[in-house]
Image (cartoon, rainbow, N blue to C red):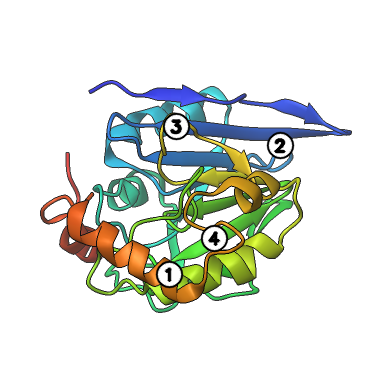
Amino acid sequence: MSFSSAGTDAFREGWDTVIFRQFCTPDDEISYLVADPVSRYAAVLDPHIEAEREYIQVVHQLDLRLVYLVETHIHESHLSAAPALQIETGARLVTHSVADSACVGMRVDDGESIFVGEEYISVMATPGHSPCSLSFMWRDRVFTGHTLLSGVTGPCQRGDADAGLLFDSVRDRLFELPDEMLVYPGRVAGSRRVSSIGQERATNADLQPQMTRAQFVARKRAEASSVSVWKEGSLAANQRCKVFN
């Protein structure tokens, strides 16, 4: 199975070297690696089973130590690589405190931070797509999982989804971030893999300024009845932390 990776392994930002990598699998799911250039500690956000070997290759190539596997939510759209990577690397799985997962090593809540060496990732609760949905802020970017995509909001087809909470999470939390903050979503929308808060606030098709909460809820309900990105058994397998070879 082929997939693509994008971004720069290491680049200069001011006086610091930033280690960052974006991965996109054939099902259009996106995951990320961030690392501290001093300690060489690294975290993978939303690890995907189809990119498992690529994460390991990058860790080895850049002489990193994978310490965290950070999930924006327990996924229904793909199988997580977290259980296998936990066994291979000893990294800890990080989820929302309310996430249903059998192998969590660290539970976090809104306002807390995850320290990756000298880098830190700030936690923002953004429920709606699921009750355990989180977004993570790191430097000049926010990783939004399936809450906010590029040009649209995430789907609400799960049984535990709440379109009203999704509206609140995006409008009242994410859209309060600075315009220039980069948005790195957990799924490709169209062909876009990155956006910005300012661009989303101005052009997001699901959340134009005149859109009311009730209108948004009705829109997402209609969308959920016609479109699904569920994969049979993925949610249950990820909750059980099933390891796939």
> Considering the image in quadrants, where does the C terminus appear?
top left
Question: Which mark, residue 215?
Answer: 1
Which residue is outermost to the front? Answer: 210
Q: 223 or 113: nearer the eye? A: 223
Q: Residue at x 64, y 72 (%)?
A: 112
Image quarter of residue 222: bottom left
Decide if residue 139 is on the left or right side of residue 225.
right
What amino acid is labelled 3 in the image? Phe
**Distance from label 2 to label 4 (Cα)?**
23 Å
Q: Amino acid under label 1?
A: Gln
Tag of residue 135: 4
Q: Earlier in the sequence, mark 3 or mark 4?
A: 3
Q: Residues within 10 Å of mark 4 (few under 14, many from 20)?
A: many
Q: Amino acid at mark 4?
A: Ser
Identify the residue at the far left of this view: 232
Q: Nearer the viewer, mark 2 or mark 4?
A: 4
What percent of the width, then of the height, locates residue 36? 68, 42
Q: CA distance from mark 3 to mark 4?
A: 18 Å
Q: Which residue is mark 2?
A: 37
**x%, y% of residue 166?**
45, 69
Indicate which disc, 3 or 1, sits on the residue closer to the N terminus.
3
Instruction: Work out whether mark 2 precedes mark 1 in sequence or the reverse, and give the earlier one.
Output: 2
Disc 3 from disc 2: Cα separation: 20 Å
Q: Secondary structure at mark 3?
A: strand
Mark 2: few, some, or many residues within 10 Å (few <14, many ≥20)?
A: some
According to the picture, the residue beneath numbered tag 3 turns out to be 23
- Mark 3 nearby-residue class (10 Å; few <14, some 14–19, many ≥20): many
Q: Position of residue 239 (x, y in %)?
A: 24, 65
